[in-house]
Structure formats: C-alpha cells, structure tokens
Amino acid sequence: MFGADDGAVAVTVRDYGVGLRPGEAELVFTRFWRADPSRNRKTGGTGLGLSISSEDARLHGGRLDAWGEPGQGSCFRLTLPRRVGDELEGSPLPLPGVRSVAAPDAIAAPDALLAAPVDTAQEIPLPEGEAPEGEDAAEAPERGSAGLSESGAREETT
C-alpha cells in the first residue's frame, strides 16, 4: 500500500507467512539475524537484506519498521521524507500494533493494509515550488514530477 502526506511518503508490504514472534520485529534488521538459524533450514537468506534496506532508509532520512505475529504474517513499512534534510514526524501509513506520531489513534487491523493495488508508475508530486535537483522549476513538469524518464531512470541535464 502507498501513502503520502505533506512531510513523508510511505509504502507497506504485507505477507501471510509464519509471522514474527514477540521481540523479533526489532531483531529482523540486525545483520545476519535469521528466525531459523539452523543449517538444515530450507528457506531464508543470509540475514543481510533487511539490515541493508534499513541502512538505506536511514541514509535517505527515513526508516524501515516491521510488525508481525506468529501465524498472522508480517508487515514492513518504508517511510521517507518528501524533502531532503527534513526530519520524519511519523508515517502517513499505519503499521499494525505500532502507534504513529502522525496518526496516534490509527492502529489498523492487518487486513487494512491490503487496500486496492497502487499503480506502480504513479508519480509522486513534488511540493510546490521545488524542482528536482539541478533543474529549473519550469523544466520539471516536462519530465515528470521527479525528473524521471518514461522508464523510471533519472535523466541527466546538460
């Protein structure tokens, strides 16, 4: 699910797998942590993916949050600020079991995060008066709201 407000954009990803036991939501971002550390396991990776993702989010001024319950699956939320350098004051999307500063009473049921699918080609409009880095505001509308080409790649200016 996708959400946005004046200060941030967010996306959640939900699965209905085995879920997370109490306390594991904080551990999933630890390097090399795995829910099943046995050598006989048939699923899972090295335990680096979520750690790298969390660090990427942090380097972009955002955060990655997790929720899960045994037998209920897991939900991950990426929240990034709309403007470079702005501090996050919450997230425009609730995460089950996690109170958001932006919406303190919005504790959603897990299924509430499974709203209508979002068009992956959807543009995220820039705040008024702001152009993509290195461009005039007048040029930005010609190339889309984020200075991206039709393929989604950032176009270079000369």
Image (tube, rainbow, N blue to C red):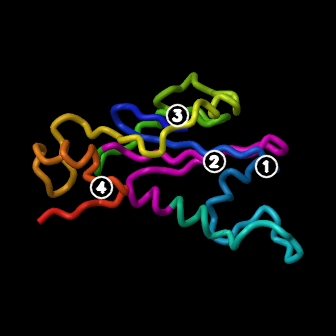
Regarding mark 3 in the picture, which secondary structure is present there?
loop
Tell me the quadrant of the picture where the C terminus can be found.
bottom left
User: 117 or 14, which lies in front?
Assistant: 117
Residue that badge 4 annotates:
149
Q: Is residue 152 above or below residue 8?
A: below
Residue that badge 1 annotates:
17
Residue 66 - label: 2
Q: Which amino acid type is shown beneath numbered disc 4? A: Ser
Q: Earlier in the sequence, mark 2 or mark 3?
A: 2
Q: Is residue 38 above or below residue 70?
A: below
Q: Is residue 9 left or right of residue 40?
A: left
Spatial separation of the CA atoms under disc 3 and disc 1:
21 Å
- Residue 104, how many percent across, how many down? 54, 26
Residue that badge 3 annotates:
93
Instruction: Specify the segment rendered in magenta.
Output: 55-82
Q: Earlier in the sequence, mark 1 or mark 4?
A: 1
